[in-house]
Image (cartoon, rainbow, N blue to C red):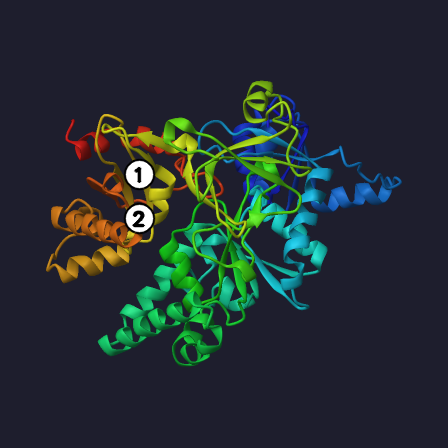
Amino acid sequence: MNEAEVGAAYTNADLLNTIKNVAGKCPTLKKIIYDGEAKPADVIALQEAHPHLELITLEELKQLGVDNPVEPVPPAPKDYCCIMYTSGSTGNPKGVLLTHGNLVAAIGGVNKMLTKYIHEGDVLLAYLPLAHVLEFLVENVCLFWGVTLGYGTVRTLTDASVRECQGDIKELRPTLMTGVPAVWETIRKGVLAQVSQGSPLVQKIFHAALNAKAWCLDRKLGALTGIFDAVVFNKVKQQTGGRLRFALSGGAPISQETQRFLTTALCPILQGYGMTESCGMCAILTPDVFNYGRVGSPVPCTEVKLVDVPDAGYHASDSPRPRGEIFIRGPSITAGYFKNPEETSATLTEDRWLKTGDIGEWHPDGTISIIDRKKNLVKLSHGEYIALEKLESVYKSTAYCNNICVYADSMQSKPVALIVASEPRILELAKAKGIESKDFAELCKDKVIVKAVLDACLATAKRAGLKPAELLQAVYLESEEWTAQAGLLTAAQKLKRKDINQQYVAEIKVLYGTN
């Protein structure tokens, strides 16, 4: 608020108390516009604490417009659409300058690529914050297409998180959906939890059908999969309303195991790739070139090239698959960061290429995979590099894991992990191990439970084909969820790695045996 020198803030009546706590630190703030029914006590407290602020209800704002009409002023392409702040997962948030031209270019690129897959009557479930560039772009594209938008929240998505009513997905019955990997992991684990409650025969039939349908899909034998849907998977599809045709995952890497599971049991989970700085767009995986572990082909509004990262052994001349840092250029790319020329010059080259910091790999069919993250590459004691985000996307699919932060000390030979444990699965594990009379927090410290979770993580790693240097040495189980309110996640549910590592310094030392 201070960097943008805001003069007015729009908020919900429920958040007036929050505004009261920060308004004194924002000298340019003069007006507060709010929606909803405010508690009289909150209004009085805000006015007493900050008498210089003018409070305006949304209805009063509308009336101001009626009383003071002006001619429409259409924006020019170079006019700013918004300053969208990055999530701050790797440092302080940066204000990305996005123009109307940037947004229109991104919408045009997505439309060119995906419009043939959009049907009349399509419905999208929108639940990510609009301050997340993926949601911002997707909702604008849907408005352009005429797709119906239904608004939900992360907390009420599924039946498991609500009482005496249906979750947002089952109630709205969307045909399209976007999400971040954490949401897909939640849906996958919810399906598996339901399957595990069935008899051994039911479980055996489900997993046999899953493997058989996946085998058919891998060989483009989609015509043979109807029997599996009719007998087994239509019940799974009903958990999302039964109409979902395909979904787009973005914001972070999704584990191949989760993508394969949901694509087989539910619908194709496509991947997209982009950044706030590129208006959310660089590449999209379309249904006709579907393949696991790829983020698709470049969107028509972007140019993409790979640049050598010799220290990590990546070269654009690598054969048969060129590898290197992904650079993007095109009309959807930001002109820079607000009041931050140093970061602008560090991120954009003189000829306007955006350095993404992601390591990509080209495939012969023109699609690209994200194989590493330059900033989160850690060189271990034996000289081998590992990518923390890649490992997190793999290990997060372990049943006992709700969230995970992988940490690697360059003086050590293997990484360790801080895991937010899944309470229902840990309680099941304790029962299976014959451990009684312990609450969840105590179970997270039980050596037998910790060893079992580590073994499960290593089994996941083995299935994913991770290298020896990528195998976890030890894990710490956390019983409390990480939240944005606690400062450990961003608003887009990404890890604030630096803050997490600082909070768990002592636990990390114990994991490495250096305390």
Badge 1 density bin: few <14, some 14–19, many ≥20, Cα 10 Å: many
Instruction: Give the numbered dot on residue 406.
Output: 1
Q: Quadrant of the C terminus?
A: top left
Which quadrant is home to the N terminus? top right
Q: Is residue 409 above or below residue 439?
A: above
Is label 2 in a helix, a strand or a loop?
A: helix
Distance Cα–Cα, label 1 vs label 2: 9 Å
- In the image, residue 222 lies at what x, y percent? 48, 73
Q: Quadrant of residue 205?
A: bottom left
Query: In the image, what residue type sits under mark 1?
Result: Val
Where 45 falls versus 453 (above or below)?
Answer: above
Q: Are marks 1 and 2 in contact (CB under 8 Å)?
A: yes
Q: Quadrant of residue 408?
A: top left
Residue at x-position 39% and y-position 72%: 213
- Residue 353: image location, x then y, percent: 60, 30
The picture places residue 449, in percent across and down from the top left corner, at 16, 51
Residue 142: percent from left, percent from top = 66, 56
Q: Which residue is mark 2?
A: 395
Most foreground residue, 485 or 193: 193
Q: Is residue 443 visible?
A: no
Of callouts 1 and 2, the N-terminal one: 2
Q: Secondary structure at mark 1?
A: strand
Amino acid found under the numbered disc labelled 2: Tyr
Furthest toward the top, the residue is 342
